């Protein structure tokens, strides 16, 4: 029986309203039958547990959507079921994403009692005008009050900010980031505003209702962010995530280090036992599938060695720690997953660093992640004549940044 680590992602698809920048799987519904959803999530979870017996559960992440809209009893039921299905690590990390409006903040005490020990709070800004632009349902003062309440109820608290908004300047962002660094959390997720296809912002830009910040100004803000967080001893451990050593999101590290994770709930992705899984996105379709099949899977596909190696490369280079490319090549039975001559040229130009078979991006290289991935990835990785070694719990590494925008789960 294996004791290989496993992460669990639980997707709650409902929101009070749809933010104009959001392309996540989120839906607005007038009514939510909490009991039906609790039962469906538990059935979906039981399906994954039957396939993944004997694993060691290291983290649970409730993402969305807005998971703080879940009844705490539903959260508790999922946590209890997961602990029954698998042996949990003594230091298991259980994160829930929350919005900071006062109604949801009132649930923090009950969510902590349900077993959540890490809260990820979507503050997004300290400025009411910016919050209005972003379509957020809370004010700046509500956000700060919710943060104080979160810090009183959870051992670990992270919060998100969105920057590089139209008109953002280095002076304004420096003030905002300085305030964020003074608020006493040990994790920050700092995302540049991106205009995703299919969002309301994409339509607004197409109609020329606003102009996104240009690439040069955005790059300057990224460099400023790196300098300020490093000086405050909260360096980037991933492109957009900052924490002192030991305070990183262990759940998200499981994605980026290419470990197995089970994903349940509408639209959730998973990667386990060499397969990629996708659940039905639309809530009603998900419920119907669970009632019919006992799970919400709409797509399940075995990854080829080349696909798995490609994903591991893309995810791993998002991390400051980088990847052991030589070890990943061995793991997937490849002669190599990168073009080493091109890697060495990027080392010489100051965009990458290399120590034998271990590679990573420099600060200069992180600004050009997508381009570097396109440069070093072999168009057709060579499969070794030797068989791939038996799957091992590799020190979990990062996903093809060109294809990834941030999400609490890939």
Image (tube, rainbow, N blue to C red):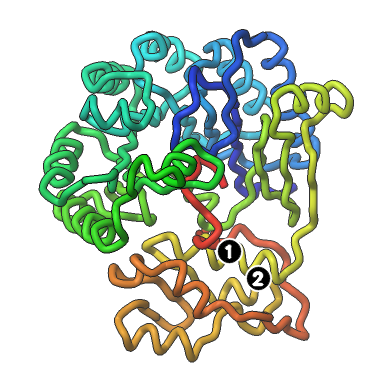
Residue at x 60%, y 10% (from the top left corner): 30
Circles 2 and 1: CB atoms closer than 8 Å: yes
Q: Nearer the viewer, residue 88 or 290?
A: 290
According to the image, label 1 marks what residue?
A: 312
Task: Locate residue 222 relative to residue 35 in the image: left or right.
Answer: left
Q: Nearer the viewer, residue 409 or 17?
A: 17
Question: In x, y percent, where is residue 34?
Answer: 64, 10
Residue in view at x 46 percent, y 46 percent = 206
* 188 w.r.t. 36: above or below: below
Give me the residue at 60% from left, 47% from top. 5
SS at mark 2 in the image: helix
The one nearer the camera, 395 or 205, is: 205
Label of residue 331 in the image? 2
Q: Is residue 152 visible?
A: no
Q: Is residue 145 left or right of residue 69?
A: left
Tell me if residue 161 comes above or below residue 155 in the rendering.
below
Q: Position of residue 373 (x, y in %)?
A: 50, 72
Above or below: residue 58 compared with residue 368:
above
Q: Is residue 151 visible?
A: yes
């Amino acid at each position: 029986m294996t004791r290989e680590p496993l992460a669990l992602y639980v997707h709650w698809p409902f929101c009070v309203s749809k933010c104009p920048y959001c392309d996540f799987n989120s839906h607005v519904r007038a009514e939510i039958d909490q009991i039906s959803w609790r039962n469906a999530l538990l059935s979906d979870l039981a399906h994954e547990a039957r396939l993944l017996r004997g694993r060691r559960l290291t983290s649970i992440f409730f993402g969305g959507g807005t998971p703080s809209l879940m009844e705490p009893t539903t959260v508790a039921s999922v946590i209890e079921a997961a602990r029954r299905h698998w042996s949990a690590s003594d230091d298991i990390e259980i994160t829930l994403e929350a919005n900071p409006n006062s109604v949801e903040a009132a649930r923090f005490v009950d969510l902590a009692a349900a077993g959540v020990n890490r809260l990820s709070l979507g503050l997004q800004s300290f400025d009411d005008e910016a919050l209005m632009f972003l379509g957020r349902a809370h004010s700046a003062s509500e956000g700060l009050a919710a943060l104080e309440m979160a810090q009183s109820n959870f051992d670990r608290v992270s919060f998100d900010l969105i920057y590089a908004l139209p008109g953002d300047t280095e002076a304004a962002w420096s003030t905002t980031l300085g305030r964020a660094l003074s608020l006493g959390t040990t994790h920050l997720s700092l995302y540049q505003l991106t205009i995703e296809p299919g969002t309301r912002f994409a339509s607004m830009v197409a109609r020329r209702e606003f102009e996104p910040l240009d690439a040069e100004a955005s790059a300057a803000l990224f460099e400023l962010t790196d300098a300020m967080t490093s000086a405050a001893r909260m360096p980037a451990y991933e492109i957009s995530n900052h924490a002192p050593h030991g305070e990183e999101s262990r759940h998200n590290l499981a994605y980026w280090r290419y470990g197995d994770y089970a994903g349940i709930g509408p639209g959730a992705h998973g990667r386990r036992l060499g397969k990629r899984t996708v659940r039905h996105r639309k809530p009603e379709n998900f419920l119907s599938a669970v009632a019919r099949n006992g799970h919400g899977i709409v797509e399940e596909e075995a990854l080829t060695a080349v696909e798995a190696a490609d994903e591991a490369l893309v995810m791993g280079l998002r991390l400051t720690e980088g990847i052991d490319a030589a070890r990943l090549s061995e793991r997937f039975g490849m002669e190599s997953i990168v073009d080493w001559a091109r890697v060495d040229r990027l080392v010489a130009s100051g965009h990458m660093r290399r120590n034998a078979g271990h590679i990573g991006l420099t600060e200069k290289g992180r600004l050009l992640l997508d381009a570097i991935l396109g440069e070093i990835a072999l168009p057709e990785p060579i499969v070794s004549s030797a068989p791939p070694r038996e799957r091992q719990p590799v020190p979990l590494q990062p996903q093809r940044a060109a294809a990834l925008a941030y999400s609490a789960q890939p």
